[in-house]
Image (cartoon, coloured by chain):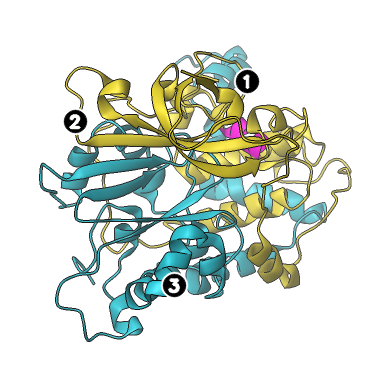
Chain colours: A yellow, B cyan
Amino acid sequence: MNGPHDLGGQMGFGPVAPEKDEPYFHADWEKRALGLTLSGGAFGAWTIDESRHARENIPPADYLAASYYEIWTRALEVLLERHGFATRAEIDAGRKQTEPVTPKRILKADMVAGVLAKGGPCDRPVGTEPRFQPGDRVRTRNFNPQTHTRLPRYARAKTGVVEAVQGSYVFPDDNAHGRGENPQWVYTVVFDGPEIWGEGADPTLTVSIDAWESYLERV
Amino acid sequence: MSADHHDHDHHHEHGHDNRYSDMQARVKALETVLTEKGLIDPEAIDAIVETYETKIGPRNGARVVAKAWSDPGFAEWLRTDATAAIASLGFTGRQGEHMRAVFNTPETHNLVVCTLCSCYPWAVLGLPPVWYKAPAYRSRAVIDPRGVLAEFGLTLPETKKIRVWDSTAELRYLVVPERPEGTDGLGEEALADLVSRDAMIGTAVAGAQP
């Protein structure tokens, strides 16, 4: 979707504001929001792709005004409600009013080290050979799906060169919507700055994306 | 803003949502509900926070870089199979499952961004800083990297190529900065001291700051 999250090339946000000796958290609630988001993910009820899409669906004005932990929190609430774990009214009240569905897993303190060390690999075998090889010239698709995609707007309908075949991975455009993992080959595709940004682009710039095979067409 | 009471629900749909005006209260309510329902363990949250405050941070990545500078065999392994090379130092797991290391050279400077969200190599750098997740960096890194770098106090030669890696898939990128001059005698621990978090994102070079 062409949501507020798709920020590459947008203007008007001002200078980057690095903070010297930045703390890991700026408020206690950020710590809890991190832990709640990971604990919710452990339920096994939604995928990382669905959670990303929930964040993208925050109304643009809210998304752009929110800190990232607020973005996570808002999306977590949507996911909890969608999957039957908590209603909006319960969260508003801060009190249990209904029985939740049973998650596949509840993250306990003694599981944390193991879960974090294991992570969630999303490489999957596919039954086909890669369609493209390093050096191939490719053009990204020109589309504007209303659903989740990881092809940024700035990199659509652009010609680049395949630099590497990176393996085969869960396809987020399907997985975010419960249509299955449907893995595809992923390629690092490099674009010259002027191909993306046109007149006045920095001639020393190249930008790469990691693109699923169905994003690409041979040139 | 309308004070009409009938505007209440409409207000939540289209205007600023007051639910999120006090995040401390909002998140507390969320944690309370989920705890009452038996869905979360507050001590698990404590453990997650402690892990990222004390165990998983940019020192991990700095050790990887220092080893790559010191051991050509490891550097080659890192270049060809970063996930395995990094795992050999004990750094694995969440947001580090599929690692790639990209090496700065005299000709090319690498810069990592996630324009679509906040993808970041947690296993080697820990939690991302606020600026990495904020619109200014995410919007400009791909179109005006030199301007962004200047805001970090880094001005590259005009002839130096800049390669920006937009983390659009599940690969996570670690920049291996160039080893500073005059560090020949240093061991890995001392070398790691020269490698900042920002140098491994690409918004700094090694040795520029402690």
Marked residue chain, label 1 = A
Q: Which residue is mark 3?
A: B74
Residue toward you, A161 or B46:
A161
Residue A52 magenta-highlighted: yes
Q: Position of residue A8 (x, y in %)?
A: 37, 29
Image point 62% across, 35% down: which residue?
A130
Q: Label 2's element?
A: loop
Residue B146 falls left or right of residue A142: left
Residue toward you, B41 or B145:
B145
Q: Which residue is mark 2?
A: A203
CB contact under 8 Å: marks 1 and 3: no
Measure the C-alpha gap from mark 1 to mark 3: 42 Å
Q: Position of residue B58 (x, y in %)?
A: 41, 67
CB contact under 8 Å: marks 2 and 3: no
Q: Which residue is mark 1?
A: A147
Binning the other alpha carbons within 10 Å of mark 1 as few (below 14), some (14 to 19) or many (20 upward) gives some
From where the camera sits, is residue A77 visible?
A: yes
Q: Label 1's element?
A: loop
Q: Quadrant of the C terminus of chain B?
A: bottom left
Under mark 3, the amino acid is: Phe
Q: Do tags 2 and 3 sit on the same chain?
A: no
The nearer-to-camera label among 2 and 1 is 2
Determine whether A68 is above or below B13 in the image. below
Under mark 1, the amino acid is: Thr
Q: Quadrant of residue B10?
A: top right
Residue A183 magenta-highlighted: no
From where the camera sits, is residue B63 visible?
A: no
Under mark 2, the amino acid is: Pro
Q: Do tags 2 and 1 sit on the same chain?
A: yes
For the record, the magenta segment spans: A49-55
Measure the C-alpha gap from mark 2 to mark 3: 33 Å
Determine whether A184 is above or below B100 in the image. above
